[in-house]
Amino acid sequence: MVMPALKCPYLAQLTLQQVRASAPNILNTGAVSCPIFGQFVRKISTTGLNNAASLNLSSALVNFDDIKAVHERMQERKTAENIETLSTARNKTSSPYGEIIVSTECEDLSCPFLKQTPIALRRFNHDHRTITTNRKLEKLIHPMATNINLFEYDHFFDQKIEAKKSDNSYRIFKRVQRKSGFFPQAEERKNLDDDKDSRTITVWCSNDYLGLGQHPKLKKAVINAVTLHGSGSGGTRNISGTSPLHEKLENELAHLHQKESALIFTSCYVANDTTLFTLAKSLPKCHILSDSGNHASMIQGICTSQVPKHVFRHNDIQHLEELLKKLPLHIPKIVAFETVHSMDGSICNLEAMLDVAHQYGSITFIDEVHAVGLYGHNGAGIGERDNVLHKMDIISGTLGKTFGSIGGYIAGSAKMIDFIRSYGSGFIFTTSMPPTVLASALAAIEISKSDEGRALRRKQQENVRELRSKLIDAGLPVIRAPSHIIPIHVGDAALASLLCNHLLDRYSIYIQSINYPTVERGTERLRIAPTPYHTSEMIDQLVDALKHVWQDVGLTLHDGEKQHPQYMRHHA
């Protein structure tokens, strides 16, 4: 059928985007407010759109001039007083649409009828390339608005943020600019655009554990890669995003962990989440047994899979076995845990954990994020150190900590890796790693497997032992652990933040306080990570500064022989 031409002289002045954005409201309110549009809609409702003849309308009978004439006659009847009354009424609840304040963006809407309705038009600002609204002068009424109170999104966000601030768990990021060649020192930047008020600080909380992020070989690899290949990968792995560098890195990672295959992801969070979710969701009647101290990325994959979950106490092999005994042997089971815990520094009894899991028909998923590059002859982690790589089913690791770059990966059997490659949406639908990152990671693994890498690991462990011993002797409540991570228990979020700020402001020492949700409330702490490049002088300066700020905030130093217990964060 041919629809009649109804070209409104007022709506015709608007852009197509403006009309489309408010089309539902124009349709509903125009039928009530506009005499011409209302007449047309009433005819449609009685005759039906499919009966063109019964409309008895044509573009000749209902045209531009007719519509404009009706509008003009209606406006001539209104005196200045009536118009003012209408304008006042529009801002009061007497409007059938409730309190209507027409947006200043709606000045284009000159139709005297639709202007009484909750039409909110938005103009695209080409200068700033943003859609602007004047929130100070107006209240935008969205299409299809009614008398029902709408949800106050900003108010909700404000409340949630205020709750974080009130319990001192709100995080304010320190602006730290790393300076190549000065590691572990960096620059604290007060201003984004210039060096005014910047100063040199010593960083004690970096996860760049061996300082490889500033190693000359890695920098050279990045420069060469961007010169040869550009900055981006070009797409997902399936769509133009797989290069020889991707395959080389996966081969190197598989070889490092003595596995058949490996798969790289944009982060280890994505690697853990995607792998655990995909496995648990796909394996029939699968159950997951998860360590209570597992990282948020593992918990995310486990929870979203919605399979039965059994949480065992942190590194508690006996509790794990008790839970396994309750499950049928024949059903698929995944036992997921970490080797080195990021917040308490503990190291699991890896071989015992693997043996118990396999005894009851489980496969194991082992997070070696805080171990790769730091343990074992080649830096493959605790599995290599303990000579049990052959017992580990799935290993996850990161390129963003010891290897000085960004990204994550899993390593395992060729069939398992191919399964995740084919079914894991977190891998399939993500743009692949850029050539600069790949080249940097390849250089880092090469260093890790060399004598230089082994020397860096030895020096780091020496610094860890020296610092831990001096902190304990100073009476600070160190949570003792066998790894390279040195946590100091504070137990109060506000005090932990205050300690962090005092260290930075007064001593130019940066240690980030750790609070909820990274750790449980009441177990807030400072987390220290010595590197091979921290000197004995730096260690002494840190210990002395910690003693002073500790007492300044009202905390007490203890007997150096006292060992502080470990605290675990909540498992979701």
Image (cartoon, rainbow, N blue to C red):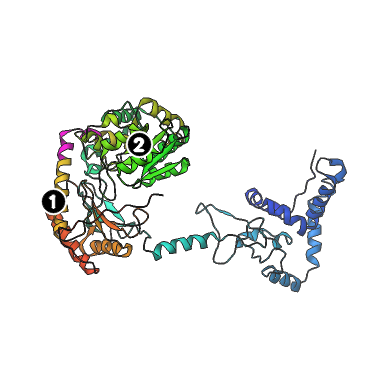
> Residue 394, located in which quarter of the rendered image?
top left
Residue 5 place in picture, x, y as percent: 78, 46
Q: Which residues are magenta?
A: 445-455
Q: Could you classify mark 2 by the number of other residues whose Cα lies within 10 Å: few (under 14), some (14-19), or many (20 or more)?
A: many
Tell whether 425 sits left or right of 447. Answer: right
The mark that comes first in sequence, 2 or 1, is: 2
Three-letter code for the amino acid on which mark 1 is drawn: Glu
Residue 484 place in picture, x, y as percent: 21, 46
What residue did someone put label 2 on?
Answer: 365
Specify the farthest residue to the bottom. Answer: 81
Q: Is residue 10 magenta?
A: no
Tell whether 301 sits left or right of 503. Answer: right
Q: Dividing the image into 4 quarters, which one contains the N terminus?
A: top right
Three-letter code for the amino acid on which mark 2 is drawn: Phe
Kind of element beneath mark 2: strand
Residue closest to the eye, 58 or 326: 326
Q: Nearer the viewer, mark 2 or mark 1?
A: 2
Count the marks: how many? 2
Residue 451 place in picture, x, y as percent: 15, 34
Question: Relative to 452, is 172 above or below?
Answer: below
Q: Are marks 2 and 1 in contact (CB under 8 Å)?
A: no
For residue 466, the mark is 1
Can residue 226 be seen in the rendering of this structure?
no
Residue closest to the eye, 543 or 116: 543
Q: CA gap, disc 2 to disc 1?
A: 33 Å
Residue closest to the eye, 377 or 202: 377
Q: Could you classify mark 1 by the number of other residues whose Cα lies within 10 Å: few (under 14), some (14-19), or many (20 or more)?
A: some
Q: Which residue is depicted at the point 36% across and 25% down?
A: 414
> Residue 25, located in which quarter of the rendered image?
bottom right
For residue 452, the mark is none
Residue closest to the eye, 297 or 325: 325
